[in-house]
């Protein structure tokens, strides 16, 4: 029998909780360690739509990248989305586990998966925190125009659109930093890259990166981190062949494009 505790222990081999940022909240945030697990739902976020999908699927565990509870909660009521999600999980005996900043910097974590899905070769860590660990990745693609690379990024990530600023360079040496990594663009320039794929880019960062000679592409927080879900499914399925692991089909980016 596979339990929640078994999966928590396994995740420690991929993204130990000791590697998280001090401000982060990771691990088992709702549920019972001794609960039997037959089905796991993997998603980027653990919110209401994902919780209901887990109920419909009959899953005993939701495994996500983002935390269900991030900031301390003064109360848990059905007046908030987090409160309603917690009620749903508890009512149906579903546990919720997350690996967040510890998965961001993991050797095969969020940004490594982003680099892989974008087809980067010779992938390496920018400014490693220790051997094999670090936030951002760099690599190379066949030299091409920025327009050609933009098309490749949009297709690979299934993104509805991209924001970008062109420094007037072709694309060859690429850095990636999914999620809220946009402010790391100076380290990307220092690493000798001509292009940076990231998200949550502020207005001034577009200008400053471009003026520093860096093509910068904002592909969206959801779309730059979502590739890690496939990796988690692959790893869990290999480690626990007796359980069913499903990637969420309901979870989507809440931000939409109009027009």
Image (spheres, rainbow, N blue to C red):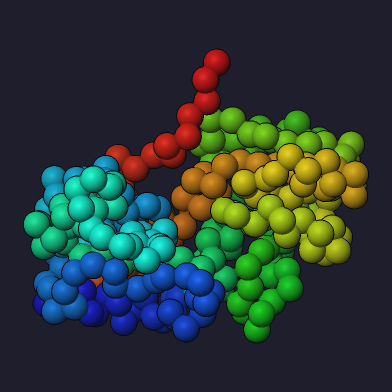
| Observer-nearest of 216 and 70 | 70
Q: Is residue 245 visible?
A: no
Q: Is residue 120 left or right of residue 7?
A: right
* Whether residue 192 is situated above or below residue 148 in the rendered picture: below
Picture residue at 62% right of the left edge, 47% below the top: 199
Picture residue at 60% right of the left edge, 55% below the top: 180
Q: Is residue 30 left or right of residue 198?
A: left
In which quadrant of the rendered image does the C terminus lie?
top right
Which quadrant would residue 132 be assigned to in this image? bottom right
| Observer-nearest of 55 and 123 | 55
Q: Is residue 213 left or right of residue 55?
A: right
In which quadrant of the rendered image does the N terminus lie?
bottom left
Q: Position of residue 237 (x, y in %)?
A: 29, 65
- Point out the residue furthest to the top here: 259
Label count reads: 0
* Whether residue 210 is situated above or below residue 19 in the rendered picture: above
Picture residue at 37% right of the left edge, 52% below the top: 45
Q: Position of residue 14 (x, y in %)?
A: 44, 76
Q: Position of residue 122 (x, y in %)?
A: 71, 64
Q: Position of residue 219 (x, y in %)?
A: 61, 41
Q: Is residue 219 left or right of residue 228?
A: right
Which quadrant would residue 90 be assigned to in this image? bottom left
- Point out the residue furthest to the front here: 74
Q: Is residue 146 visible?
A: yes
């Amino acid at each position: 029998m596979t339990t929640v505790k078994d999966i928590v222990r396994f995740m420690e081999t991929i993204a130990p909780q000791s590697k998280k940022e001090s401000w982060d909240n990771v691990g088992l945030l709702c549920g019972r360690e001794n609960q039997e697990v037959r089905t796991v739902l993997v998603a980027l976020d653990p919110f209401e739509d994902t919780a209901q999908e887990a109920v419909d699927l009959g899953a005993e565990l939701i495994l996500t990248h983002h935390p269900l509870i991030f900031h301390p909660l003064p109360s848990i009521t059905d007046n908030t989305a987090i409160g309603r999600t917690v009620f749903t999980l508890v009512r149906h005996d579903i546990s919720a586990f997350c690996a967040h900043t510890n998965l961001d910097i993991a050797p095969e974590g969020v940004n490594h998966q982003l680099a892989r899905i974008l087809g980067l070769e010779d992938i390496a860590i920018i400014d490693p925190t220790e051997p094999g660990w670090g936030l951002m990745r760099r690599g190379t693609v066949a030299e091409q125009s920025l327009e050609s690379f933009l098309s490749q990024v949009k297709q690979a990530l299934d993104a509805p659109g991209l924001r970008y600023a062109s420094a007037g360079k072709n694309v060859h040496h690429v850095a990636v930093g999914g999620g809220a990594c946009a402010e790391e663009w100076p380290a990307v320039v220092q690493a000798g890259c001509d292009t940076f794929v990231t998200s949550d880019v502020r207005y001034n960062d577009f200008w400053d990166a471009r003026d520093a000679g860096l093509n910068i592409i904002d592909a969206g927080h959801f779309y730059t981190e979502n590739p890690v879900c496939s990796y988690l499914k692959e790893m869990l399925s290999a480690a626990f062949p007796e359980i069913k692991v499903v990637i969420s089909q309901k979870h989507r980016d809440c931000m939409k494009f109009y027009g």
